[in-house]
């Protein structure tokens, strides 16, 4: 949807073929990190985002057992605000802006079964062929087009050993308890860290909803899916003995409202492009949630495509534009993709000398020094949040253009 918006804003005619019968409110909380927010500002979506988001002010890191504070960090605003939002609200903001453009068309209930590369087109499951000058495949973690583009459907993700429960609580139930009311009222993210587990929680939808993500050891039995239901009893057992606020949150969850998602590390792909077809988003770099960059990296891809497909002067240059797209995006997104796993080790240390040293580092990071939590670490933030995907795309285009000029001169 972000790609449709940025390309639509630049005057391209975009047809979105969406497999779902209709666009529905799915998902839970998501972070709009500064690298993504700056792009949304440029595309005129930021006001809609701010109408439903919560701008974080602090990140608290707490010990699992008693909820004592290990560290409190003010949000680093060097690169702009860090906001959190319900995925559906972010999605709706992008949909509203994109579909307001006359040159952007959405076709729901249109699952893609196949792709053709020359000339580019997709074939829907009902046999309809939709063609264009370029096919951009943002068909998610279970992408159909990825396997066809790579001529390889055997690429396997490796389970990292964790799964997460995802829970959303309404304000009406949180405010009945003074401790929980404080959690939903304040613009802060709270992280509890403990042996083999951690919890991250923050308010979304202008403090009307509380989003909680509980990471725990993967016992098998769940799929890498955003819609698999989890068991409340397993969740209770997973957090026995944790801070009373965590246990109270779990008690409040309705039995059928727990979603469980298996975390897997996906290997970098050989390529993201073939002719005039390109992959973007989770189709080519599904992310682990440890540094909260899943949506942001997909939006960065969209930003690069918006620039590169608008820099060219004829459709014959599309393959070149896609080469520049891969050049500007692949290394960046894959570095982010592979970066989260060390965070898992640090956050999940068993109680003992290593954990005590880490907790000391959390305390020290309040005044200076590195933060053991990569998501809150300033150096990591500089790399993640300081990036300008549109600028990087322009640079990649100049490089590809220069290479072509040299090549033509030598012929
Ligand atoms: C249901 C759902 C819930 C999510 N919840 C969260 C969350 O709570 N927190 C979080 O951080 N991230 C969540 N994510 C992931 C996050 O949205 C993505 O990491 C990120 O936004 C990347 O987006 P994407 O567009 O590449 O992929 P996705 O967001 O997965 O979008 C892919 C789109 O392609 C469509 N599609 C797939 N196959 C086909 C096909 N063959 N033909 C046509 N259309 C097809 C899908 O219906 C979907 O609309 C969720 C994703 C989904 C799908």
Image (tube, grey):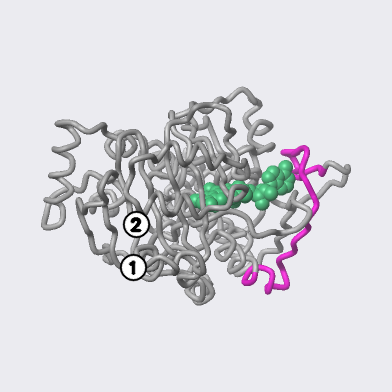
Q: Which residue is pictured at 43% across the width and 50% down the height?
A: 293
Q: Please state if 95 lies on the left or on the right of 290 as rendered.
A: right
Of 164 and 371, which appears nearest the observer?
164
Task: Give x and y (percent) for residue 187.
Answer: 35, 68
Res. 87 image quadrant: bottom right
Compared with 262, 321 (above or below) is: below
Q: Which residue is pictured at 72% across the width and 69% down the height?
A: 103
Q: Is residue 409 visible?
A: no
Other-residue count near label 1 (Cα within 10 Å), few / some / many at <14 / 14–19 / ≥20: some
Write the start and end of the magenta stretch as one range.
Answer: 96-124
Asked if residue 197 lies in the magenta stretch, the reply is no
Pointer 2 residue: 385
Disc 2, ligand 1: is the CB inside 8 Å? no
Task: Give x and y (percent) for residue 227.
Answer: 63, 44
Q: Is residue 305 visible?
A: yes
Compared with 107, 80 (above or below) is: below
Secondary structure beneath label 1:
loop
Labels 1 & 2 near each other (Cβ < 8 A):
yes
Pointer 1 residue: 80
**Which quarter of the figure is the N terminus placed in?**
bottom right
Of 283 and 91, which appears nearest the observer?
91
């Amino acid at each position: 949807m972000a790609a449709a918006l940025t390309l639509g804003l630049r005057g391209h005619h975009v047809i979105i073929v969406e497999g779902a019968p209709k666009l529905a409110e799915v998902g839970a909380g998501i972070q709009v990190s500064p690298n993504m927010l700056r792009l949304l500002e440029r595309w005129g979506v930021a006001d809609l985002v701010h109408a439903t988001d919560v701008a974080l002010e602090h990140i608290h890191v707490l010990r699992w057992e008693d909820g004592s504070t290990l560290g409190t960090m003010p949000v680093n605003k060097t690169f702009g605000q860090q906001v959190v939002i319900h995925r559906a609200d972010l999605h709706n903001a992008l949909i509203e802006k994109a579909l307001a453009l006359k040159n952007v068309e959405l076709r729901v209930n249109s699952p893609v079964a196949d792709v053709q590369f020359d000339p580019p087109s997709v074939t829907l499951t009902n046999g309809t062929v939709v063609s264009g000058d370029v096919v951009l495949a943002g068909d998610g973690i279970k992408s159909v087009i990825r396997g066809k583009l790579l001529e390889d459907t055997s690429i396997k993700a490796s389970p990292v050993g964790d799964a997460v429960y995802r829970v959303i609580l309404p304000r009406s139930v949180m405010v009945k308890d003074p401790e929980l009311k404080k959690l939903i009222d304040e613009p802060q993210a709270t992280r509890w860290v403990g042996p083999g587990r951690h919890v991250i929680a923050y308010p979304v939808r202008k403090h009307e909803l509380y989003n909680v993500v509980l990471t725990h050891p993967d016992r098998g039995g769940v799929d890498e899916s955003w819609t698999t239901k989890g068991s409340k009893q397993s969740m209770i057992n997973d957090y026995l003995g944790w801070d009373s606020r965590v246990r109270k949150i779990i008690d409040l969850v309705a039995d059928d409202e727990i979603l469980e998602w298996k975390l897997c590390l996906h290997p970098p792909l050989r390529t993201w492009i073939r002719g005039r077809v390109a992959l973007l988003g989770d189709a080519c770099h599904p992310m682990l949630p440890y540094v909260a960059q899943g949506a942001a990296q997909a939006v960065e891809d969209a930003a690069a495509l918006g620039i590169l497909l608008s820099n060219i002067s004829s459709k014959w240059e599309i393959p070149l534009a896609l080469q520049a797209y891969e050049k500007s995006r692949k290394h960046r997104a894959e570095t982010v993709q592979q970066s989260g796993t060390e965070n898992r080790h640090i956050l999940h240390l068993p109680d003992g000398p290593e954990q005590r040293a880490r907790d000391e580092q959390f305390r020290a990071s309040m005044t200076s020094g590195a933060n053991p939590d990569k998501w809150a670490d300033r150096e990591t933030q500089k790399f993640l949040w300081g990036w300008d995907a549109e600028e990087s795309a322009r640079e990649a285009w100049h490089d590809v253009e220069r290479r072509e000029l040299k090549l033509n001169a030598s012929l």
